[in-house]
Image (spheres, rainbow, N blue to C red):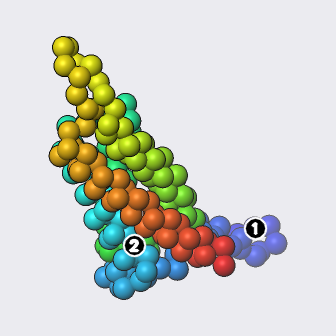
């Protein structure tokens, strides 16, 4: 009791005063019924194919294709994590602006994947470059490696396009 006889109200509970998570996408399996959910699944599919194809090409130019591998593997696992967070419903439990995080993630990965696509296309374009290996002159890429790199270039472009579409959808949600 205070001097005037009135009691001081208790301080507000800080857990109640924070705003809830901001997300406009549905959580759980309903996420897969949205365009964003479909694009995330396509990003995982195409990113996994890029990863497999570049790894199977024997990586003739490690400086260029090393970046492609880094981007495809990292984006693959982060997209799986992103999908898992939405499918498990954790987006409703974690206090964050998910609309902004969705935009920031897809912007970053789009920029990195676009660079990876350009590097993979540059590697593929060097098919006829003659390399002097010991005493023989041979092309940088064999015909089978060339075909694998063409497929990797196509799938990296498709993954980049999916990340770009997800970026556009995330921008619309973040800035209505």
Query: Image quadrant for the C terminus?
Result: bottom right
Q: What residue does disc 2 label?
A: 39
- Image location (x, y in percent) of residue 133: 22, 19
Closer-to-camera residue (29/50): 50
Between disc 1 and disc 2, the foreground one is 2
Which residue shows up at 36% across the image and 77% down it?
38
**Residue found at the very far top of the displayed protein:** 135
Residue 95 visible in image? no
Number of callouts in the render? 2
Q: Quadrant location of residue 42? A: bottom left
Query: Image quadrant for the N terminus?
Result: bottom right
Closer-to-camera residue (93/51): 51
**Which type of secondary structure does the marked residue at label 1 adopt?**
loop
Decide: is 77 above or below 167: above
Q: Is residue 60 left or right of residue 156?
A: left
Question: Mark 2 Cα within 10 Å, few/some/many (few <14, many 20+)?
Answer: many
**Residue found at the very far right of the displayed protein:** 4
Looking at the image, tell me whether mark 1 or mark 2 is earlier in sequence order. 1
Q: Is residue 146 left or right of residue 89?
A: left
Which residue shows up at 20% across the image and 14% down it?
134
- Image location (x, y in percent) of residue 55: 22, 43
Q: Is residue 167 left or right of residue 175?
A: left
Q: What residue does disc 1 label?
A: 2
Which residue shows up at 19% across the image and 19% down it?
136
Which residue shows up at 20% across the image and 39% down it?
142
């Amino acid at each position: 009791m205070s001097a005037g006889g009135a009691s001081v109200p208790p301080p507000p509970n800080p857990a109640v005063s924070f705003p809830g998570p901001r997300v406009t996408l549905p959580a759980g399996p309903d996420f897969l019924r949205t365009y964003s959910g479909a694009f995330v699944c396509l990003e995982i599919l195409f990113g996994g194919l890029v990863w497999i194809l570049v790894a199977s090409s024997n990586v003739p130019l490690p400086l260029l294709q090393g970046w492609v591998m880094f981007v495809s593997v990292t984006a693959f696992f982060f997209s799986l994590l992103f999908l898992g967070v939405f499918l498990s419903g954790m987006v409703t439990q974690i206090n964050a602006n998910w609309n902004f995080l969705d935009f920031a993630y897809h912007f970053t990965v789009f920029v990195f994947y676009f660079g990876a696509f350009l590097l993979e296309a540059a590697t593929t374009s060097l098919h006829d470059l003659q390399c002097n290996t010991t005493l023989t002159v041979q092309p940088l890429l064999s015909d089978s490696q060339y075909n694998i790199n063409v497929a990797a270039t196509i799938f990296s472009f498709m993954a980049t396009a999916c990340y770009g579409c997800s970026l556009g959808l995330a921008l619309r949600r973040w800035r209505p």
